[in-house]
């Protein structure tokens, strides 16, 4: 026997599904992706661990102080015992030459690495949005100047140029209120973000080119809206999805960029620490103490992988037609 369907209820259900915002639809799709949800949980745990690093260290009874008594005087200052001096007091071992607890260094290092990564991503995305909006909306000579400038920046050997620039700027003692490692962090954020923004600008430009001919933009012009209002009130809200996707996929790239520069010695300097700085120090003692490189490497690989998986999930949630390779 065929069931009788209430046409009013059915129409209401279809209408409710159609009126859901793109953001809610994307969130619903993201929740159904178990891999992305697991990656998001891991990323959240990493962020919480970095924010509450001092509290976690206090609870676990570890610190970043030097413990020279734990080093072997007959083995060139390397940790006593096996696996880098691992013990109940120092679960991941200690740092060669200094005796600092490796778990505490990883927790505090995550704060530095993620702060630089998020700061550089923010610089890149903000610059990319501004110049991408201008180039795509105004066109003409504005588009030509911005497009050619970004192409010049993209043609630079960015990594080598960044090393040279950081080596020069890193010798500065003070810029405004910034000194020491605070100044070096600010320089890293600016350099990584500045050389990353051309890619963001090109994506924003292509999105704006497809939006500026839509009816809602033409209607805003007819109603007398200024260019600024059209850019901020009409175009920018329609770029929310691409901006979120781009930001989530840019963070792991900036994490690796900071690690590479710090690994080469132009990033954060001791006694402050970052994951890249730990890997750089571990590379000099890898043959004698491989455990010192193992844990920072695992932390970085796991974090970058989680950010990439989360970014892929967000991209697929906002663009269901895209397929994972």
Image: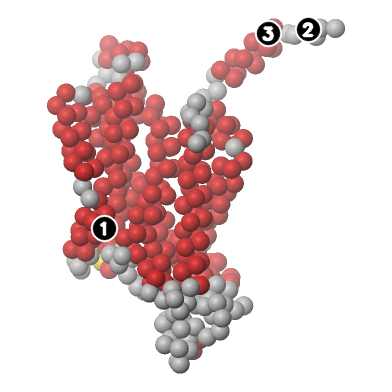
Crowdedness of circle 1 by 10 Å Cα count: few (<14), some, many (20+)?
some
Residue found 16% across the figure and 23% down from its top:
140
- Left or right: residue 184 versus residue 7 is left
Query: Quick check: 16 above or below 28?
Result: above
- Left or right: residue 102 versus residue 180 is right
Crowdedness of circle 2 by 10 Å Cα count: few (<14), some, many (20+)?
few
Residue found 78% across the figure and 7% down from its top:
4
Q: Secondary structure at mark 3?
A: helix
- Which residue matches tag 2? 4
- Left or right: residue 248 versus residue 5 is left
- Which residue matches tag 1? 187
Q: Residue furthest front?
A: 287
Query: Quick check: 311 above or below 276?
Result: above
Q: Nearer the viewer, mark 2 or mark 3?
A: 2
- Cα separation, mark 2 vs mark 3, equals 12 Å
Report the coloring of the rendering: secondary structure
Q: Visible in this render: residue 82?
A: yes
Query: Quick check: 23 above or below 47?
Result: above
Q: Secondary structure at mark 1?
A: helix
Residue found 25% across the figure and 51% down from its top:
158
Choose the circle earlier in sequence order: 1 or 2.
2
- Which residue matches tag 3? 8
Location of residue 63 in the rendering, given as x and y in whole percent from the top left corner? 49, 75
Asked whether disc 1 touches disc 3, contact meaning CB atoms under 8 Å apart, the reply is: no
Q: Visible in this render: residue 274?
A: no
Location of residue 211 in the rendering, given as x and y in whole percent from the top left corner? 34, 21
Crowdedness of circle 3 by 10 Å Cα count: few (<14), some, many (20+)?
few
**Which one is nearer the viewer's eye here, 254 or 298?**
298
Q: Quadrant of the N terminus?
A: top right
Q: Nearer the viewer, mark 1 or mark 3?
A: 1
């Amino acid at each position: 026997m065929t069931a009788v369907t209430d046409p009013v209820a059915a129409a209401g259900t279809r209408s409710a599904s159609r009126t859901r915002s793109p953001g809610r639809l994307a969130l619903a799709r993201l929740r159904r992706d178990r891999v992305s949800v697991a990656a998001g949980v891991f990323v959240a745990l990493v962020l919480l661990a970095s924010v509450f690093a001092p509290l976690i260290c206090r609870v676990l009874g570890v610190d970043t102080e030097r413990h020279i008594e734990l080093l072997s005087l007959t083995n060139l200052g390397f940790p006593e015992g096996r696996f880098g001096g691992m013990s109940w007091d120092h679960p991941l071992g200690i740092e060669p030459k200094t005796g600092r607890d490796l778990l505490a260094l990883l927790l505090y290092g995550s704060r530095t690495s993620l702060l630089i990564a998020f700061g550089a991503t923010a610089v890149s995305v903000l610059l990319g949005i501004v110049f991408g909006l201008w180039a795509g909306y105004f066109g003409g000579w504005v588009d030509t100047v911005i497009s050619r400038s970004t192409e010049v920046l993209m043609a630079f050997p960015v990594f080598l140029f960044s090393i040279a620039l950081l080596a020069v700027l890193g010798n500065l003692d003070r810029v405004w209120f910034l000194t020491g490692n605070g100044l070096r962090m600010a320089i890293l954020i600016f350099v990584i973000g500045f050389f990353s923004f051309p890619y963001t600008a090109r994506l924003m430009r292509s999105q704006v080119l497809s939006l500026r001919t839509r009816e809602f933009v033409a209607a805003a012009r007819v109603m007398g809206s200024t260019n600024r209002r059209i850019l901020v009130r009409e175009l920018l809200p329609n770029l929310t999805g691409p901006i979120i996707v781009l930001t989530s996929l840019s963070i792991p790239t900036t994490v690796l960029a900071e690690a590479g520069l710090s690994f080469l010695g132009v990033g954060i300097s001791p006694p402050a620490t970052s994951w890249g700085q730990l890997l750089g120090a571990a590379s000099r003692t890898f043959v004698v103490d491989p455990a010192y490189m193992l844990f920072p490497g695992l932390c970085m690989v796991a974090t970058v992988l989680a950010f990439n998986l989360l970014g892929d999930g967000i991209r697929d949630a906002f663009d269901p037609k895209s397929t994972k390779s």
